[in-house]
């Protein structure tokens, strides 16, 4: 099968969130199992600088706002995955990030910028594609490529399309006056199309016109069909239930491997787990905590926002410390929460520590050195840190939502709590502290988590099976 995978970001070229992790990992994993999957993404300055040698393989005109573009063919760094880069300087050559300027404001022409990306994706999947290589299926991601299934629909649906929702909260909403500027027919602006409460929504377009919808975990696929996580889209999603599937993300098991992780002071594994003790000792030393091998050490790595539940952790921090525990927090976000974290640390020298910002190496050392990992997100489409924790023998304590519910087995590999409230989190922490006192039972839970396989191969096989089912239906004449 030939798969064109359209995305607005991918590691190691450019990243703002989990979409980049998936886009950088899934296409290579699909190629590993025999599919010819190729990426299409914008030519931001960072992408043009970091990609390898490229050749011009096509040119496009007649794009939204009369933009012109070149299509460059390279490979995704670190793999043999073909990479199509859309070099449209008027759209993508900016001084800030992919979606916002240096001051954190959305670019005023984001609708046109990502309509260009979506339209090129649709053209490459149509009979008049300028390329010899033709996809059997178009896979889009989030609102930035959400218009591609709409454009494809008005080209006669030459191939089936999939859209993956990584986070429904981002919907790509623009004024109705934008519609004619993007080359969409007037009839598309209706409830049976791209219209969403009087505006244009790129994501609504994808959810309406794509042949299939996927999300990044089975539970999230269920949650977004109702309030509050449906975020206004729940009615449409419920009507498309038969076409929707949740496929859990994988993790990079090469980068996140305690037996070969160069960020760690010592290696360990499922068969030789003793090195984890040294990781804890050195983490306590690095973060200025008391050298206490028996203290249950709780770690947190997250954006410091309401969604990530950091306020819940701060509400129970005193209890953790009173019970002899220690707490390390890493992240950045809301300034009020950042200050509350600093205040907590100041009140408990030697028992609490923080790093406001982001440090990749430290994130690995926290995963390895902590005994428990706190992940109380109010919602979490998939989540990665809980899977890193399991792989590193660090017991996760999670809110039972989205991918957290799907990956952490309560009482077997970690602990879940049902309500996003301090008392519910505290009850889960008390369960963890009770088990921690029983060293044999604790080790059993650690090893159970380390034995789980969250590699991308499993996810890739699920996607491949879905693609095959779609193409078989198309061959049989099914809608």
Image (cartoon, helix red, strand yellow):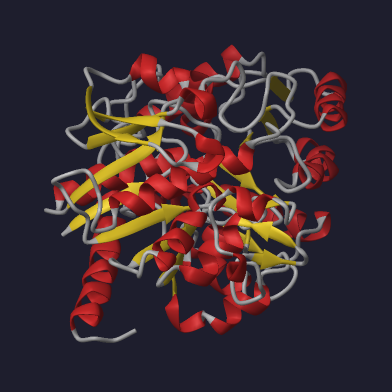
- Relative side of 313 to 48, left or right: right
- Relative side of 22 to 37, left or right: right
User: Which residue occupies 44% across, 62% down?
Assistant: 149
Q: x%, y% of residue 277?
A: 45, 28
Q: Which quadrant is home to the N terminus?
A: bottom left
- Relative side of 175 to 150, left or right: right
Q: Nearer the viewer, residue 64 or 346?
A: 64
Q: Nearer the viewer, residue 331 or 207?
A: 207
Q: x%, y% of residue 474?
A: 24, 78
Q: Quadrant of residue 251?
A: top left
Q: x%, y% of residue 335?
A: 84, 27
User: Which residue occupies 62% across, 58% down?
Assistant: 168
Q: In this view, does 30 lie above or below 270?
A: below
Q: Which of 439 and 100 is in front in this view?
A: 100
Instruction: Using the rendered image of the protein, determine whether residue 38 is visible from the camera's viewpoint.
Output: yes
- Relative side of 157 to 461, left or right: right
Total number of numbered discs in the rendering: 0
Instruction: Using the rendered image of the protein, determine whether residue 390 is visible from the camera's viewpoint.
Output: no
Q: x%, y% of residue 425?
A: 74, 55
Q: Is residue 229 above or below residue 300?
A: below
Q: Quadrant of residue 187?
A: bottom right
Q: Which quadrant is home to the C terminus?
A: bottom left
User: Which residue occupies 61% across, 65% down?
Assistant: 186
Q: In which quarter of the image is residue 357?
A: top right
């Amino acid at each position: 099968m030939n798969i064109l995978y359209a995305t607005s970001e991918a590691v190691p070229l450019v990243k703002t969130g989990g979409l980049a992790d998936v886009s950088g990992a899934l296409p290579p994993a699909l190629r590993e199992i025999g599919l010819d999957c190729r990426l299409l993404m914008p030519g931001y300055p960072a992408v043009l600088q970091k990609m390898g040698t490229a050749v011009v393989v096509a040119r496009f005109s007649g794009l939204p706002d009369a933009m012109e573009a070149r299509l460059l063919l390279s490979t995704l760094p670190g793999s043999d995955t073909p990479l199509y880069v859309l070099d449209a300087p008027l759209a993508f050559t900016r001084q800030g990030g992919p979606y916002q300027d240096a001051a954190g404001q959305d670019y005023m022409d984001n609708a046109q910028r990502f309509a260009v990306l979506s339209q090129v994706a649709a053209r490459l999947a149509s009979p008049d594609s300028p390329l010899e290589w033709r996809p059997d299926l178009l896979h889009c991601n989030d609102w930035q490529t959400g218009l591609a299934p709409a454009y494809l629909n008005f080209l006669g649906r030459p191939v089936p399309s999939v859209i993956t929702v990584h986070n429904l909260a981002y919907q790509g909403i623009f004024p109705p006056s934008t519609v004619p500027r993007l080359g969409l027919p007037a009839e598309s602006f209706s409830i049976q199309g791209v219209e969403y409460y009087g505006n244009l929504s790129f994501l609504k377009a994808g959810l309406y016109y794509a042949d299939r919808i996927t999300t990044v975990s089975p539970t999230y696929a269920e949650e977004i069909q109702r309030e509050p996580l449906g975020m206004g889209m729940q009615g449409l999603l419920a009507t498309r239930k038969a076409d929707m599937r949740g496929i859990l993300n994988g993790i990079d098991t090469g980068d996140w491997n305690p037996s070969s992780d160069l960020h760690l002071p010592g290696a360990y594994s499922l068969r030789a787990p003793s090195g984890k003790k040294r990781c804890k000792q050195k983490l306590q030393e690095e973060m200025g905590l008391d050298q206490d091998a028996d203290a249950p050490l709780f770690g947190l790595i997250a954006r410091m926002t309401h969604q990530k539940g950091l306020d819940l952790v701060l509400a129970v921090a005193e209890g953790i410390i009173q019970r002899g525990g220690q707490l390390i927090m890493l992240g950045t976000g809301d300034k009020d929460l950042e200050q509350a974290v600093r205040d907590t640390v100041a009140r408990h020298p030697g028992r609490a520590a923080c790093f406001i910002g982001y440090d990749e190496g430290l994130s690995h050392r926290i995963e390895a050195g902590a005994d428990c990992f706190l992940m109380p997100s109010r919602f979490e489409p998939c989540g990665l840190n809980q899977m890193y924790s399991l792989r590193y023998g660090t017991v996760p304590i999670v809110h039972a939502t989205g991918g957290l519910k799907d990956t952490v087995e309560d009482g077997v590999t970690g602990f879940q709590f049902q309500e996003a409230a301090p008392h519910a989190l505290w009850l889960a922490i008390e369960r963890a502290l009770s088990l921690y006192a029983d060293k044999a039972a604790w080790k059993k839970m650690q090893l159970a988590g380390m034995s789980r396989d969250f590699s991308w191969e499993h996810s890739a096989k699920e996607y491949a099976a879905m693609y095959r089912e779609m193409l078989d239906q198309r061959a049989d004449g099914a809608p």
